[in-house]
Image (cartoon, helix red, strand yellow):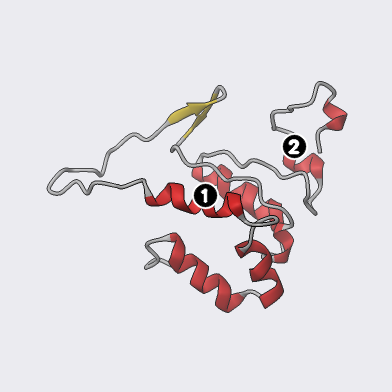
Amino acid sequence: MATITNVTEYQAIAKQKLPKMVYDYYASGAEDEWSLSENRNAFTRILFRPRILIDVSKIDMTTTVLGFKISMPIMIAPTAMQKMAHPEGEYATARAASAAGTIMVCCCIHFSATTFLSKNSAFFYRDRWLTP
């Protein structure tokens, strides 16, 4: 895992390790996969310019999202049914997000206990009990 440099390499490893049905679920998109295609196309338009001979060891990437300070401008998007890929599902993802100092956006379709995931979460419905 230390030598992985891009998402395509993660995808190849996932294809090897996950059962076909699970991999196909995560690798696909809804209906005609238009949103999936547009998301991939959007990332092809983003280029990173290498900083050669510049000390980047002490860069501060912290930012604020909806009033929450996070360590970097990267968050974990909602992903349904994470226990298909890992026995601890959303618990493991929440711990990883916390360790990285970023935000995990919970999906309304999950297998983990809502109370564990939401005790320190923002609620988007007027009535907290409606928040999954």
Residue 47's place in the image compared with 87, above or below, is above
* Tag 2 secondary structure: helix
In screen coordinates, is 127 left or right of 54? right
Q: Amino acid at mark 1?
A: Glu
- Residue that label 2 marks: 118
Residue 54 in percent (x, y) is at 15, 43
Q: Amino acid at mark 2?
A: Ser
Quarter of the figure with residue 123: top right
Residue 112 in percent (x, y) is at 78, 51
Identify the mark at residue 38; answer none if there is no mark: 1
Which of pointers 2 and 1 indicates the residue nearer the eye? 1
Residue at x 45%, y 47% (from the top left corner): 42
* Tag 1 secondary structure: helix
Residue at x 62%, y 56% (from the top left corner): 33
Please rate how many residues cluster around mark 2, counting C-alpha atoms within 10 Å: few if below 14, some from 14 to 19, many from 20. Answer: few
Q: Nearer the viewer, residue 53 or 79?
A: 79
Quarter of the figure with residue 31: bottom right
In screen coordinates, is 96 left or right of 107? left
Residue 85 in percent (x, y) is at 67, 65
